[in-house]
Image (tube, grey):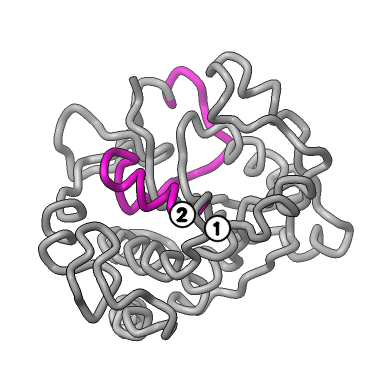
Amino acid sequence: MLYRFLDWSRHIIRRLPAAIPSSCALCGITDETALCQDCAAQFFSRHPSRCRLCASPLAHTTTAPQQCGECLRNPRAFDATIVASDYTAPIDHLVLALKFGNRLALAPLFARLMLDAILRERAFAMPTLLTAVPLGEKRLAERGFNQALEIAKPLSHAIAIPLEPQLLERTHDTAMQALLPPAERHQNIRHAFILSPQAAALVRGQHIGIVDDVLTTGETLNEIAATLKRYGASRVTNFVFARTPPK
C-alpha cells in the first residue's frame, strides 16, 4: 500500500510546481520536465551498493544492508541515509545552481529524484516527521533561502509526511564545512543546534527525517542526529540529494 502511494506521489511531483524549467537542467534540450530521459538514464540510472548509515558507495555489491569501514570505526548518531546520486560532475553543477545561482525551480527536481531513491529502498521504514538542516541567520540573510528547506517542501508533499521547518535552530553561525579540513569539521559544528521547548515534545519517540542537499563527511547530520536523540528521537534518517564520494 505504501509503495502504491509513493508511486502516485512520484507521478504528482513530476508535475509540480509550474515553475519547473521547460528545458533539461543538464543538457538544455526542450523537455516537459526539468530532466530529460537521456540525462536521467546517463547520470541517475547507476545505483551502487551503499553503506546503510552514510550512503558511501561500497566496493562490493550486496543486497543486504552493510556498513562502510568508516562507520564501523566511528559509529554515527543517525540510523540511515538515502541519497539520489553522488556529488560528481555534472550533478555538482545542479547543486551549485540551486545553492548559489538562485535556481529554486531545481528544488522539486531534487525532491523527485530523492523520492525515486526512497522507492528503491523496499524495506525502508518511513519517518514520522520531516525537517531540514537549518542555516545560520547570517547565511540565510545573505542567500535569501535555505536550499535544504526548498527541497524538503515538495518532498514532504510527495511522501505525505509533516514538515516542521523550525524544528531545529542553529545556536551560532558556523564556518562553511566545505571550506574546512576534515579534522576541523567536527569541532566547527559541535553544539551548533538546539530544539525549542515546543519542538522537544514533537521529537520524543519519533522517527525524524532530515533533508539536506549534500553529504560530505556527515559531521553536520551527525550533530543534528545526536541533538535529536538527546531530546528523545527514536530514529533519525537522512534524505540527501548528493553524496560526496570519499577520497
Label 1: how many Cα within 10 Å (few below 14, some 14–19, many 20+):
many
> Is 98 colored magenta in this rendering?
yes
Residue 204, x across and y down, in percent = 73, 58
Identity of the residue drawn at 71% across and 50% down: 142
Q: Residue 239 bears which disc, if any?
A: 2
Identity of the residue drawn at 71% across and 53% down: 140
For label 1, the SS is strand
Identity of the residue drawn at 62% across and 61% down: 131
59 or 11, which lies in front? 11
Label 2: how many Cα within 10 Å (few below 14, some 14–19, many 20+):
many
Q: Residue 46 bears which disc, if any?
A: none
Residue 21, x across and y down, in percent = 35, 74
- What residue sits right under mark 1 in the picture? 209
Q: Amino acid at mark 1?
A: Gly
Spatial CA distance of label 1 from label 2 is 7 Å
In which quadrant of the rendered image does the N terminus lie?
bottom left
Q: Earlier in the sequence, mark 1 or mark 2?
A: 1
Report the span colored magenta. Answer: 71-99
Residue 10, x across and y down, in percent = 32, 78
Determine contact: label 1, label 2, CB under 8 Å. Answer: yes
Can you say whether 209 is above or below 228 in the image?
below
Q: Amino acid at mark 2?
A: Phe
